[in-house]
Amino acid sequence: MKPLLYTFRRCPYAIRARIAIRVSGIEVDMQEVKLRDKPAELLACSPKGTVPVLQLTDGWVIDESLDIMLWALSINDPEQWLDHPNGLSDKAMALITQNDGPFKKALDYYKYAVRFPEHSEQYYREQAEFHLLDLDARLRQGDYLMGNRLTFPDMAIFPFIRQFANVDKDWFYASQYTRLIQWLDARISSGLFTAVMQK
């Protein structure tokens, strides 16, 4: 038996979980979930019904994407993405928290602006740009978010920047965030990303 990962191909949370599992070399079975028709087995092991959810062979359930990433890399971290003996440094965690909190909230308003007619799409995009500015500035100091090598925050954050870019690709690729664009394109064109996005 293998662990079972409930996933959804385009979900940024699920993407980063699949990436960490893939790079760790751990074999898991995967079940693609239709978000409008969630299987009873998923809801039984994680009533909140969001993906990703990892059900281990002993019945233990991990239903947060960062925890799945940390679980996989704590078993095998061949590329040394973890930057602290306990997993992640405070600096790395702070950057991910900014991404998963205020940026993701702004991203959702931007992506689904038609549902929030109180403001324009441009307004919601501008609310998200604080994060783009920070990431782009970091990438002007080094090739990656935490310096000169790829680490956990790069892989935890880039699926969300990809989602942001896809809302209006013309705007994004014409923007001032040139280092961020290069960084994103390098992640998207990698063999690792291609592998975890296969149907």
Image: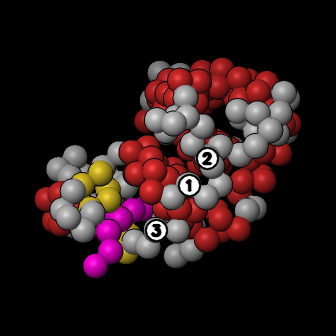
Q: Nearer the viewer, residue 70 or 123?
A: 70
**Which label sits on residue 26?**
3
Instruction: Using the rendered image of the protein, determine whether residue 156 is visible from the camera's viewpoint.
Output: yes
The kind of residue on which mark 1 rests is Asp
SS at mark 3 in the image: loop
> Could you tell me which residue is drawn at 52 percent across and 76 percent down?
199
State the extent of the magenta-drawn residues as a range: 1-8
**Which label sits on residue 77?**
1
| Res 141 quadrant in image | top right
**In the picture shown, does residue 19 fall above or below 32?**
above
SS at mark 1 in the image: loop
Where residue 79 sits: x, y (%)?
65, 55
Where residue 98 sits: x, y (%)?
54, 25
* Residue 45 shown left or right of residue 80 in the figure: left
Instruction: Work out how far the residue at label 1 is from the one at label 3, CA to CA, in angstroms.
Output: 11 Å
Instruction: Work out how far the residue at label 2 is from the one at label 3, CA to CA, in angstroms.
Output: 16 Å
Q: How many marks?
A: 3
Q: Nearer the viewer, residue 18 or 89?
A: 89
Instruction: Using the rendered image of the protein, determine whether residue 106 is visible from the camera's viewpoint.
Output: no
Q: Nearer the viewer, residue 116 or 172?
A: 172
* Residue 160 shown left or right of residue 190 in the figure: left
* Residue 80 shown left or right of residue 3 in the figure: right
SS at mark 2 in the image: loop
Q: Which residue is mark 2?
A: 81
